Image (spheres, grey):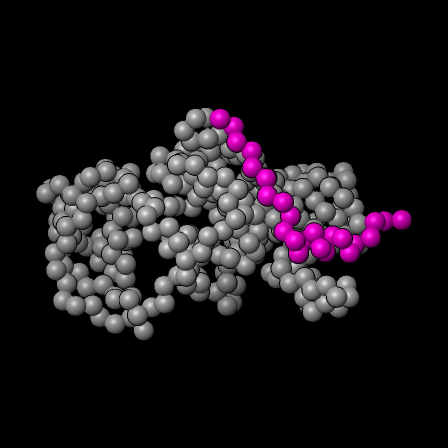
Amino acid sequence: MPRPAAAPAVRHVQVGEDGAGQRLDNYLVKTLKGVPKTHVYRIIRSGEVRVNRARAAADTRLALGDELRLPPVRVADTAADKPAPPREFPVVWEDEHLLAIDKPAGAAVHGGSGVSFGVIEQLRRARPGATFLELVHRLDRETSGLLLIAKKRSALTKLQQQFRDRDTGKTYAALVQGAWPAGRKVIDVALHKYLDAAGERRVRTTGADDADGRRSITLVKVAQHYEGYSLLDVTIKTGRTHQIRVHLAHEGHAIVGDDKYGDFALNRELARGAAFEGLRFDRMFLHARRLAFDHPASGERIELQAPLPAECSALLARLSFPH
């Protein structure tokens, strides 16, 4: 359990590259860990927070080198909490602007929602000299493959804009049940995000007239048909939560190993080695295998690829081709 810290005192903080360009409120929420957001906004409104000795609004954009005066606030002392263990991940690309890694399945990209730490926290611990490391985008915990991390705020903003504008080429490898019809190339079905009875995030398909639905487009190409399965190349034109998983399940071809929208009986058989003798497969077969984007500094078009993980290749090797 976090324990109360020592008596709080006024703090003076200089904004580094990690805070340049951020709104004041967002920067304080991140800096004053454990302080309720309502309290953060109160000390901003009251003028107790000063930026370069002047009052500032919550939406003030901070600049590199700005001097902040923070009033005494009591924050939880998390020193007793177990820190994220430092960890490096397979590097696909790296320069002074960005880092691309091949994320393993089962690793959350960040802490939260019952996960104490993720890839970004572990990388920061493994690279204490790095002044800036931020996720450009996200992958589901169960999904493996290419993940971009910015090493400069300028790179982060430019890359995120490309993701928003759909200027990135993202292709996933997905193994699904059944024979995917070769003519079914576009899925244009709206998605609605909600919480189930246990408070877990879920997504369902919905009609185009649903005010809470968001248009979602997925492109599908058959890479290989197997007996009882299909290996697909999937490209997303919109980046909705669980989009690929829900769209493919909606079409009657759930992703193998999907513990939220898949065939739970088949998943259990695969995990315990009953489906293929001597082979246990206990993950979701969804892998971000290709990512294309313009380099945030040079503008050069970069195309990265991550090969299928060994466990996915091993499963494919056990499948037979259709007669």
Residue drawn 29% across and 38% down?
A: 21
Q: Is residue 153 left or right of residue 272?
A: left
Q: Nearer the viewer, residue 206 or 278?
A: 278
Query: In what quadrant of the picture does the N terminus appear?
Result: bottom left
Q: Residue at x 23, y 37 (%)?
A: 63
Q: Position of residue 79 (x, y in %)?
A: 28, 66
Q: Is residue 157 visible?
A: no
Magenta residues, start to end: 300-323
Q: Position of residue 270 (x, y in %)?
A: 71, 64
Q: Quadrant of residue 154?
A: top left
Q: Residue at x 28, y 58 (%)?
A: 33
Q: From the viewer's perspective, is residue 63 above or below residue 174?
A: above
Is residue 276 highlighted in magenta? no
Q: Position of residue 164 (x, y in %)?
A: 46, 36
Figure check: 105 above or below 165 = below
* Residue 27 visible, this angle: yes
80 relative to 147 in the view: left or right:
left
Percent x, y of residue 143: 57, 52
